Structure formats: C-alpha cells, structure tokens
Amino acid sequence: MSVDTPGGQLFAIIAAIIFAIVFILDLAGKAEGNFINPTTLTALGLFFIALHLAPVRSPRWRRR
C-alpha cells in the first residue's frame, strides 16, 4: 500500500505525529499498573499504520 497523491505523504506524516501525541497523552493519564487497554492499543496501531504510509526512510538505504 502506498500513498500516491501529492498531499498524501504529508498527511501520513501529520497523522503519525498526531497519533504519537495521542498515545503519549493516553499513557500519561494512566495509573501505574493499567497501561494496556483498547484505547492505548488503538492509538499505537494507528500510529504504526500512519508510519507505514509515510515515506520515512534512512538516507543510507538509497541507491546511488
């Protein structure tokens, strides 16, 4: 799956940032022993999906 639209790559990066913030805020509001619940897993899953769609690559993997 790829993001072919011109604004799709930027949208995927923005979505990854937003889902990371949601995940961090969700963890910050938890009690000491109650970290994993459906909301936390959903935020984390959406974060990883957005990262998968975003074109984030390391420069060392480029072909010359």
Image (cartoon, rainbow, N blue to C red):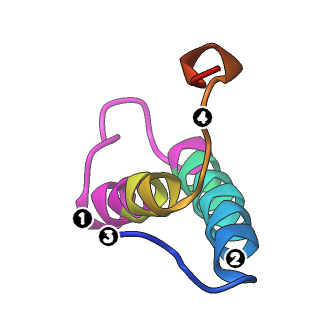
Q: Verify whether residue 24 appears in magenta.
A: no
Q: Dot 1: within a 10 Å radius of its alpha carbon, few (fewer than 14), some, or many (20 or more) residues?
A: few
Residue, far front:
64
Q: Are marks 1 and 2 in contact (CB under 8 Å)?
A: no
Residue 16 occupies quadrant: bottom right
On the image, numbered disc 1 is attached to which residue?
Answer: 38
Q: Dot 2: within a 10 Å radius of its alpha carbon, few (fewer than 14), some, or many (20 or more) residues?
A: some
Instruction: Determine whether, in the image, residue 25 is placed left or right of residue 45.
Output: right
* Residue at screen point 29% across, 56% down: 41
Q: Position of residue 32 (x, y in %)?
A: 42, 30
Q: Earlier in the sequence, mark 3 or mark 2?
A: 3
The correct choice, above or below, for 56 with respect to 5 in the image is above
Q: Nearer the viewer, mark 2 or mark 4?
A: 4
Q: Nearer the viewer, mark 3 or mark 2?
A: 3
Could you give the CA–CA distance between mark 4 and mark 3, rounded to whole angstroms? 16 Å
On the image, numbered disc 4 is attached to which residue?
Answer: 57
On the image, numbered disc 3 is attached to which residue?
Answer: 1
Task: Give amino acid for label 1.
Answer: Pro
Could you give the CA–CA distance between mark 3 and mark 2, rounded to whole angstroms? 15 Å
The correct choice, above or below, for 53 with respect to 48 in the image is below
On the image, numbered disc 2 is attached to which residue?
Answer: 11
Residue span colored magenta: 27-45
Q: Are marks 2 and 4 in contact (CB under 8 Å)?
A: no
Q: Earlier in the sequence, mark 1 or mark 3?
A: 3
The residue closer to the viewer here, 61 or 18, is: 61
Q: Position of residue 28 (x, y in %)?
A: 61, 43
